[in-house]
């Protein structure tokens, strides 16, 4: 995806969308509430899958450290990781220690184990890797054994080791199970895949989250490589200016954020310029219902 996004941004630069313009739009970051408490978070975060799986002592750490620092400096807080993301937890933990930014980050991880003891061991490992004594959110990863893990997470929430609990998926085939879990359990947060070209979550999952008072984090809001491939070499349509959109990544993020149930997309972000651009998606106006339909029709027509 790096190659595709680089090409798309190069087209934006050629069209006169300079970095200064990307950063200048719209003022303050949009914030969205976590319904179970009313706490608000900035409406775009960072995901660490794949990109943060580097050797902690390698040269690959430098751009990641710079990205996290810039993201926080611009007002971002939500960073999402998982024990299944290779060395991402360890890398993120080291970055937060070296930069002194732990207290400024809303730190999210997951548990992907079967059985209570395995879950306890994996969560303990996450605390060690992340170098912290409290994680803001731990979610059951890809709905792996929620019967064992959710009671464990509730105990950790009661003892204030974590602040929120939830469940995640990235696959439509799990939507039925996720829907059942959302109805049966008191969850603070879910994470689900949703994008302008992958809208199935809007049919039942997002409305249910709204009705149940569950915050929604969105993974793969760029559809992995699909959306950048679709728009490569194309200029933004002129009507994108109607919702303060200055780049294709912002187009995709603003579509996701314009759904009232969405709290925070967490696109993979491993370069400073991507962090700057993504946070522009959480500034200014968002598309209304008519513009959302126009965006869908535009992407569907490519």
Image (tube, rainbow, N blue to C red):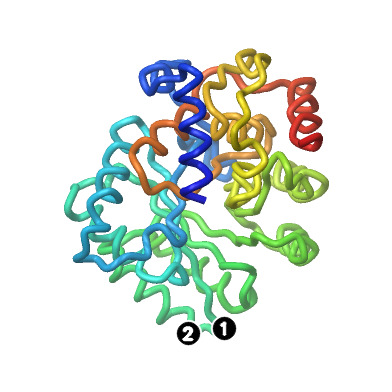
Answer left or right for 165 relative to 199: left
Tell me if residue 30 can be seen: no
Q: In x, y percent, where is residue 207?
A: 77, 43
Q: In x, y percent, where is residue 135?
A: 38, 58
Answer left or right for 202 relative to 232: right
Q: Is residue 108 above or below residue 195?
A: below
Q: Secondary structure at mark 2?
A: helix
Q: Residues within 10 Å of mark 1 (few under 14, many from 20)?
A: some
Q: In x, y percent, where is residue 31?
A: 50, 30
Q: Which mark is residue 114?
A: 1
Q: Secondary structure at mark 1?
A: loop
Quadrant in which residue 295 is drawn: top right
**Pointers 1 and 2 in contact (C-beta within 8 Å):** yes
CA gap, disc 1 and disc 2: 6 Å
Q: Which residue is mark 2?
A: 118
Quadrant in which residue 61 is drawn: bottom left
Which of 281/160 is in front?
281
Q: Residue at x 53, y 18 (%)?
A: 284
Q: Residues within 10 Å of mark 2 (few under 14, many from 20)?
A: some
Marks counted in the figure total 2
Tell me if residue 136 can be seen: yes
Q: Residue at x 45, y 62 (%)?
A: 50
Q: Is residue 173 above or below residue 278?
A: below
Which of 212/198 is in front?
198
Q: Residue at x 81, y 49 (%)?
A: 204
């Amino acid at each position: 995806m790096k190659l595709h996004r680089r090409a798309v941004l190069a087209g934006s630069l050629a069209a006169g969308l300079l970095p200064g313009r990307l950063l200048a739009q719209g003022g303050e970051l949009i914030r969205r509430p976590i319904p179970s408490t009313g706490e608000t978070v900035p409406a775009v975060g960072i995901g660490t899958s794949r990109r943060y799986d580097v050797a902690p002592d390698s040269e690959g750490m430098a751009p990641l450290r710079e990205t996290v620092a810039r993201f926080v400096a611009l007002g971002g807080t939500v960073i999402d990781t998982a024990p299944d993301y290779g060395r991402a937890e360890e890398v993120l933990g080291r970055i937060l220690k070296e930069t002194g930014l732990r207290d400024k980050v809303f730190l999210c991880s997951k548990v992907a184990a079967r059985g209570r003891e395995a879950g306890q061991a994996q969560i303990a490992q996450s605390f060690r890797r992340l170098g912290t004594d409290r994680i803001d959110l731990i979610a059951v990863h890809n709905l792996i054994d929620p019967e064992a893990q959710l009671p464990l997470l509730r105990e950790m929430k009661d003892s204030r080791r974590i602040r929120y609990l939830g469940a995640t998926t990235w696959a439509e085939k799990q939507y039925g199970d996720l829907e059942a879990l959302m109805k049966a359990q008191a969850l603070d947060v879910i994470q689900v895949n949703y994008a302008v070209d992958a809208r199935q979550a809007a049919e039942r999952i997002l409305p249910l989250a709204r009705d149940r008072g569950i915050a929604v984090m969105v993974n793969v809001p760029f559809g992995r490589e699909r959306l950048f491939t679709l728009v490569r070499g194309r200029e933004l349509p002129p009507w994108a200016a109607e919702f303060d959109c200055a780049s294709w990544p912002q187009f995709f993020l603003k579509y996701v954020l314009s759904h009232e149930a969405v709290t925070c997309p967490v696109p993979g972000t491993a370069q400073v310029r991507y962090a700057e651009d993504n946070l522009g998606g959480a500034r200014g106006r968002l598309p209304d219902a008519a513009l959302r339909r126009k965006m869908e029709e535009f992407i569907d027509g490519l």
